[in-house]
Image (spheres, grey):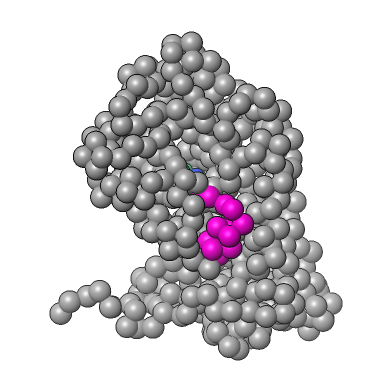
Amino acid sequence: MDYFDYKNGELCCEEVPVKDIAAEAGTPVYIYSKATLMRHYSGVVKAFAELDAIICYSIKSCGNLHILKLFAENGGGFDVVSGGELARAQQVGADMKKIVFAGVGKTDNEIREALTAGIGWFNIESEQEFENLSRLAAETKTKTRAALRVNPDVFDPNTHAYTTTGKKETKFGVDIDRAAAFFEKYGHDANVTLDGIHLHIGSPIYSPQPYVDAITKTLGLIEEIRAGGGKVNVLDIGGGFAADYEADKSPSAQAYADAIVPLLKGTGLQIILEPGRHIACNAGILLSQVLYTKRGGDKKFVIVDAAMTDLIRPALYEAEHFIYPAHLDHDEFPPNRRFDFAPANGEQVDIVGGVCETGDILGKSRTLPPMQRGDLLSIFSAGAYGFVMSSQYNARPRAAEVLVDGDSFKIIRRRENYNDVFAAEIF
Ligand SMILES: *Cc1c(COP(=O)(O)O)cnc(C)c1O
C-alpha cells in the first residue's frame, strides 16, 4: 500500500502531480511520500506492539536526514552499519540508547566513535571483533553492551544470492554451533556486557517461515547459553521484511508478526527489529525523463536521464522495478505494479541509462505506451537501496531528493553540481 496513484491521467505522489515536482526540481529526482513512510513505519510498530519491541530503522536502506528525523521524532531507534551512519543518527538527535551497530568490518575509529556516543548495542560478528571492542572500551574508559550476531543457517530460497546472509557460508555472524562457546568465553567481560543475540537472515524474506525457523533455533540456543551460566536479555531479529516490487508479493508487517510474536511473547527478552526496505521501498519513486528512443537490431530502447548511477539494483542484482509513464493520454492505468500488464498500444522496450556500461539497464523487455522525448517515466519501488547506492560514476552529479507531504513538497537534498563531484580532489 502506498500513496502513488494516477489522478486524471497524471501520476501523483499524495496530492502532488509528479510533473510539478519535475518542473521545479528537475530530473532525475527521487520522490518520497511522507504518508507512505509513516504508514509503513507505524504498521511495524503496531504489529509488534505486544512485544514492546524497539524499532531500529535501517539507515542504509534510505538515509536522508530529513527522513531519519521523522522516525527519531516518533521515538524510533536506528540500525547503523558504519561510522557515517552513526553520524547521521547523531545529526538528527536520535536516542543513542536505541542505536544498534552491525557490520563485519568495524574500524577502531568507528568503534571509538560509537563507544563515546554511548550507543545501545554493538552487534558483534566475530571473536576478534569482540576482543577488539573490549580493548577499545577499556582504552576509552567506557562500558557497553553487545549482541552476538548468530548465523542460524536458515535462508529463503527466493532471496538473491547477493542478499542472503543467514546461510553458513556467508561472511556475516558466527555459526550457531559456535555461539554457546562464544558466550562462555566472553560472557563475563569486564568492559562489554554480552547479553544479546542478533539475527539478520537476509533480504528480502518473502514469508514469515524463515524467521520462525531462525527464532526457534535461537530460542534453543538461548536456553543452552543460560544453562551454561550466560545471560541473554536481548534478541534482535534483524531486518529483511519484504516489500512489494510487484503488487501483493510480500506479507504485511502484521502477517510477519502473527507468526513471530507468539514465539517471543512471555520470554522476557527485549526484542529489537531492524526494518529498512519494508518501510522505505514503496515510499519512493525515481522520476526520469525520456531523452531518446532508438532501435538496436530487433530491440527498441528508451534512453532516460536516470541511470545505474542513480539506481544500481537492476544492474547489481537483476532487480525488477515496475516502470510506467507519469502521464497517460488514455485510460490505460496500470494495475498497481504488475509486470505482466501490457497496454493495448504498447511496445516492448528496454529502458536504459546513458552511462558507458552495457549493464546500465533500468528495466528489461517492458511493455510501455509509445514514448517521446521529454516524457516522464516513473521507476517505482525505488525508496530503499535507491539513492543511498547512487554514485558519481561518469562524473554524473547525484539526483535530488524530494519529500511530499499532502499537497506540498520540499527538496530534502538538492541536486549535486559539478563542484560537488570534484570538491574533495586536490590538483
Ligand atoms: C541491511 C540490514 C538491515 C535492513 O534490511 P532490510 O531488508 O532493508 O529490512 C537490517 N539489519 C542489518 C544488520 C542489515 O545489514
Residue found at x 69% / y 32%:
261
Whole-percent x and y of residue 82?
37, 51
x and y percent of residue 401 in the render? 53, 74
Residue 348, how many percent across, how many down?
A: 66, 69
Q: Is residue 355 above or below residue 75?
A: below
Q: Which residues are magenta?
A: 67-79
Q: Is residue 118 left or right of residue 324?
A: left
Question: Per the image, is 59 magenta?
Answer: no
Q: Relative to 132, is 303 on the left or the right? A: right
**The quarter of the displayed image where residue 220 is located:** top right
**Count of all numbered marks drawn on residues in the image:** 0
Where 230 falls versus 351 (above or below)?
above
* Residue 314 locus on image (x, y percent): 52, 59
Residue drawn where x is 41% and y is 45% of the image: 119
Outermost residue, front side: 141
Regarding residue 352, the answer to whether it shows in the image is: yes
Residue at x 15%, y 79% (from the top left corner): 427
Q: Is residue 127 left or right of residue 68?
A: left
Task: State the residue lying farthest toward the top.
Answer: 227
Indicate the quadrant containing the N terminus: top left, top right, bottom left or bottom right: bottom right
